[in-house]
């Protein structure tokens, strides 16, 4: 029998994070395309990011339709060939839409493969050297961030340093809660490099 869950953050009621989730405005419209396998994941950071941003939307699936209204330029936040530093967008005067695939690297690439309109978007990348606070997983490469961390880093670059750091409060609490549930010994044995 599963524990009762919060209808908003989808966490067990005893571990609800809603009190920590801010409500922040952004000029940038964030569209998260979440692979369907990620939607029920216990550490769903994309949901936390979207809940904390008024100008954000979460779509779940594998195949997505372009709902662009034509008044904004869309960019794909994803490293790779042709990606330019996201800082180059900071001077754009009109609103932009930042599309963020959510899933493992393999699932995110699958989203691009199945949705040619997404793959064709101009790509932007975060700066090198960013460090993840996601202490429960081993990053597949240096600079790999969780979805919420990538969104916060991108928006801070686009709209002002530290402006969106408050989005990381529920993320930090989520990580601490998971570590607490597994116990320090298990956490150290499985997640801390010796």
Image (spheres, grey):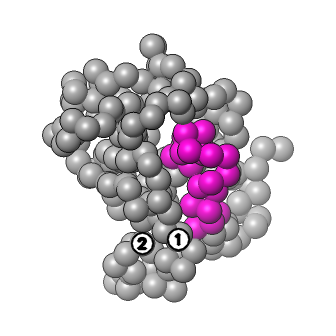
Task: Pick whichever, 151 or 26, lies toward us.
Answer: 26
Residue 100 visible in the picture: yes
Residue appearing at x 34%, y 83% in the figure: 1
- Within 10 Å of disc 2 (Cα), the crowding (few <14, some 14-19, many 20+) is some
Task: Pick whichever, 179 or 74, lies toward us.
Answer: 74
Q: Along the polypeptide, which appears first: circle 1 or circle 2?
A: 2
Discs 1, 2 touching: Cβ within 8 Å: yes
Q: Position of residue 93 (x, y in %)?
A: 45, 34
Q: Is residue 68 above or below residue 52?
A: above
Q: Is residue 40 magenta?
A: no
Residue 6's disc is none
Disc 1 element: loop
Q: Which quadrant is the C terminus positioned in?
A: top right
Q: Which of the 4 quarters of the picture holds residue 107?
A: top left
What span is colored magenta in the figure? 151-172
Residue 21's disc is 1
Residue 145 visible in the picture: no
- The residue where tag 2 is placed is 9
- Within 10 Å of disc 1 (Cα), the crowding (few <14, some 14-19, many 20+) is many
Residue appearing at x 49%, y 77% in the figure: 18
Q: Is residue 159 magenta?
A: yes
Q: Position of residue 4 (x, y in %)?
A: 38, 85
Q: Which of the 4 quarters of the picture holds residue 74?
A: top left
Task: Pick whichever, 65 or 34, lies toward us.
Answer: 65
Q: Position of residue 103 (x, y in %)?
A: 40, 43
Q: Position of residue 108 (x, y in %)?
A: 37, 35
3D distance between C-alphas at marks 1 and 2: 9 Å
Residue appearing at x 52%, y 75% in the figure: 17
Q: Is residue 139 above or below residue 27?
A: above
Main SS, magenta region, reads: helix
3 vs 150, left or right, is left
């Amino acid at each position: 029998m599963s524990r009762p869950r919060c209808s908003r953050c989808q966490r067990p009621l005893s571990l609800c994070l809603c009190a920590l989730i801010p409500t922040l405005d952004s000029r940038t419209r964030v569209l998260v395309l979440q692979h369907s396998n990620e939607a029920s994941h216990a550490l769903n950071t994309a949901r936390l990011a979207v809940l904390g941003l008024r100008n954000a939307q979460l779509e779940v699936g594998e195949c997505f339709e372009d709902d662009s209204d034509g008044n904004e330029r869309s960019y794909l936040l994803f490293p790779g060939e042709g990606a330019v530093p996201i800082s180059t967008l900071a001077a754009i005067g009109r609103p932009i839409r930042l599309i963020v695939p959510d899933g493992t690297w393999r699932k995110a690439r699958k989203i691009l493969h199945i949705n040619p309109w997404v793959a064709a978007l101009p790509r932007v990348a975060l700066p090198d050297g960013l460090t993840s606070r996601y202490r429960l997983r081993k990053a597949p490469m240096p600079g790999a961030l969780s979805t919420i961390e990538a969104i916060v880093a991108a928006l801070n670059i686009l709209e002002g340093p530290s402006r969106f750091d408050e989005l990381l409060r529920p993320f930090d609490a989520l990580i601490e809660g998971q570590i607490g549930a597994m116990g320090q010994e298990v956490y150290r044995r499985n997640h801390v490099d010796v």
